[in-house]
Image (cartoon, coloured by chain):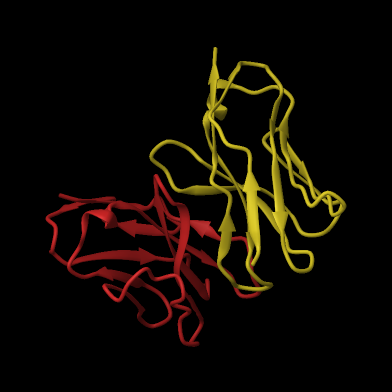
Chain colours: A red, B yellow
Amino acid sequence: GAGVSQSPSNKVTEKGKDVELRCDPISGHTALYWYRQSLGQGLEFLIYFQGNSAPDKSGLPSDRFSAERTGGSVSTLTIQRTQQEDSAVYLCASSPTGGQPQHFGDGTRLSIL
Amino acid sequence: GDSVTQMEGPVTLSEEAFLTINCTYTATGYPSLFWYVQYPGEGLQLLLKATKADDKGSNKGFEATYRKETTSFHLEKGSVQVSDSAVYFCALPVASGNTPLVFGKGTRLSVIA
């Protein structure tokens, strides 16, 4: 398909484990964003990548969270030593050069036991 | 910083009723404004947008007008359907170009037959 693809769609893991979430943006989109959606906090920005520039990490909640984007395309969000408060839906979005709008994937629902 | 205030839900309406979801914003300058919709189990979809003052965005019978004087972007639909049941988010970018979005807390709409 031509949309933003995220995997896995659901992830259940034990507290303390590391997880990796994947995002495949729309082909040609230079900007890629990660957001977190949780019941108490709504939609929060985590990190974004724009072309070859250094990513804006200002939304990452702790140093357990990191992300990379390889070859200007696929991105991986990694959460180390997961905690129960990390349980949320993680949404990825991409947008073309020049700005908005952002196109979202269906998200990864992460549950920490 | 830039922010969005959105009426809290949930909102429950009968089919064919008139819908208004209020959204006001605080921003430097005149950013583009967006309404996104999230159907159960899915990611966010762009519903409509407006890029400058007095613009009216419209899609699927929904409308919203960019009101600079009242810093508002209220979402309206004249006759809702059961299929409109979803969560609606008002949003604006934190700056021009490829930047993250700031979202309202979302309004859950349930339409009953």
Quadrant in which the N terminus of chain A is drawn: bottom left
Q: Position of residue A67 (x, y in %)?
A: 34, 75
Residue A60 position in % (x across, y down): 39, 71
Please tell me in which quadrant of the rendered image residue B17 appears: top right
Using residue B107 as the reference point, say whether residue A81 is left or right of it: left
Residue B73 in the image: state x and y as whole percent. Answer: 74, 46
Query: Is B75 placed left or right of A30 in the picture?
Result: right
Number of marks in the image? 0
Vertical comparison of A60 with A90: above or below: below
Residue at 47% from the left image edge and 54% from the top image edge: A43
User: Residue B100 appears at what percent x and percent y?
Assistant: 55, 67
The answer to which of A14 and A33 lies nearer the viewer is A14
In the image: residue A2, left or right of residue B99 = left
User: Which is more toward the observer, B5 or B77?
Assistant: B5
Q: Is residue A8 left or right of residue B33?
A: left
Viewer-side residue, A39 vs B17:
A39
Determine the residue positioned at 58% across, 36% down. Answer: B8
Query: Where B82 sits versus A61, above or below?
Result: above
Farthest-out residue, bottom: A53
Quarter of the view holding residue A86: bottom left
**Residue A47 to residue A39: above or below:** below
Please name whichever residue, B78 or B1, is drawn nearer the observer in this view of the structure.
B1
